[in-house]
Image (cartoon, helix red, strand yellow):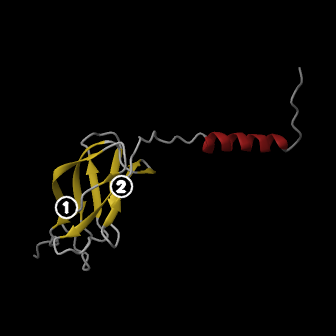
Amino acid sequence: MKRLVLKKGMASIAFSALFATISFGCKQTPDMPATYPASGKVVYKDGNPMSGGVVQFQTGKDDGTTTVGETDGRGHFALQTLKGNHKKEGAQEGIYRVTILPPQSDDHQIAPPIEIEETYTIAAKENVIPTFIVDRPQPSRGTTP
């Protein structure tokens, strides 16, 4: 049986490499669910796109995932599934309720969320969600003393 002999200084290098492998190589990542492409658009009733808003899709299940998309300058969004610090393009298969969070106004007022009455289904395929047409929200203003 052969013995492994480490020369002076090599033991600390070997220990450092082992420690790095244990510390960084064994990082746990959550099991990300299967997702499917899902995208859509949000416009105001006047036809202008909602830019900088967030579209949230919720199933009502508490599985640690969040499904959201941010609207771009043309009002388009693509859903992403978030779990912990990880994200995956697309949404899980299922039936969703939708909430739209409008962007802050120019004077930094926050508008109330817009709850969509209908539910939307994400299927195991590419999903194009019908355009959401919403009222331009009026910002919530605090009361003055």
Q: Is residue 17 above or below residue 105?
A: above
The residue labelled by disc 2 is: 79
Q: Is residue 26 above or below residue 139?
A: above
The residue labelled by disc 1 is: 113
Nearer the viewer's eye, disc 2 or disc 1? Answer: 2
Q: Closest to the observer: 30 or 7?
A: 30
Residue 139 shown left or right of residue 20 in the figure: left
> Which quadrant would residue 102 be assigned to in this image?
bottom left
- The percent coordinates of residue 6 (x first, y second) are 86, 36
- The percent coordinates of residue 25 (x first, y second) are 62, 42
Q: Closest to the observer: 118 or 136?
A: 118
Q: Quadrant of the C terminus?
A: bottom left
Badge 1 amino acid = Pro
Residue 133 shown left or right of residue 103 in the figure: left
- The percent coordinates of residue 134 (x first, y second) are 17, 66
Q: Quadrant of the N terminus?
A: top right
- Give the Cα distance between marks 2 and 1: 18 Å
Badge 2 amino acid = Leu
Which residue corresponds to the image point at 11% horizontal and 76% vertical from the top-left? 144
- The percent coordinates of residue 55 (x first, y second) are 28, 59
Residue 112 shown left or right of residue 124 in the figure: left
Residue 43 shown left or right of residue 91 in the figure: left
Secondary structure of the residue carrying tag 2 is: loop
